[in-house]
Image (cartoon, grey):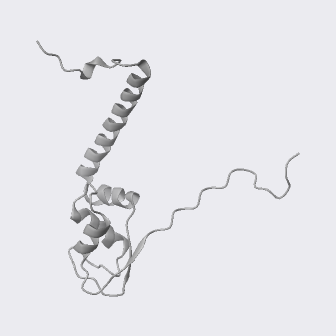
Amino acid sequence: MAAEGGPAGPSPAPAPARESHVVQRSETLDMLIRRHYAGWPFKDEVFRRALADLNPSAIPNAANNLLKRGSTLVLPTADDLRRTVQQHYPKAAEVVRIRVEVEAEEMNSRASANAAGPGGDKRRWVRFP
């Protein structure tokens, strides 16, 4: 018997809430980027453009480093950064896409080599004379 009143299928997962940041006194855009995105593999310019795209009223120009105290900024997610790279840097987007595909292929080959047992993938071995 089916339960009455229940959903017919699995419910879609809710979208994750975007992280926001309230600008403090004398805080600059570069300070915000360095604090929240330290260690990310993008240049600061990509973060500036992503923040400007998400917060057009607070940051009208991506080159502007000044922020108004008390304004709330929406912080970009990884998808927002990917979209920014594709939109503003199309040649870099192609390189990033290729690199992601190459890394995925390498991970698949490593997984198959690990399944084959030790020494399964000898192509990466170093040969000495």
Identify the residue at horizontal 22%, vertical 65% (top origin): 45
Q: Is residue 73 visible?
A: yes
The image quadrant that residue 75 belongs to is: bottom left
Residue 1 x, y percent position in the rendering: 89, 45
Q: Camera-side residue: 78 or 23?
A: 23
Residue 97 x, y percent position in the rendering: 32, 44
Q: Give the tally of numbered discs.
A: 0
Q: Farthest residue toward the right?
A: 1
Identify the residue at horizontal 44%, vertical 22% (top origin): 115
Q: Is residue 78 above or below residue 110?
A: below
Q: Is residue 44 above or below residue 60?
A: above
Q: Quadrant of the C terminus?
A: top left
Q: Camera-side residue: 113 or 62?
A: 113
Q: Farthest residue toward the left?
A: 129
Residue 90 x, y percent position in the rendering: 26, 53
Question: Relative to 87, is 116 on the left or the right?
Answer: right
Identify the residue at horizontal 32%, vertical 37% (top origin): 103
The image quadrant that residue 99 belongs to is: top left
Q: Farthest residue toward the front?
A: 118
Q: Camera-side residue: 16 or 111?
A: 111
Residue 14 x, y percent position in the rendering: 58, 61
Q: Is residue 48 visible?
A: no
Q: Is residue 75 above or below residue 66?
A: above
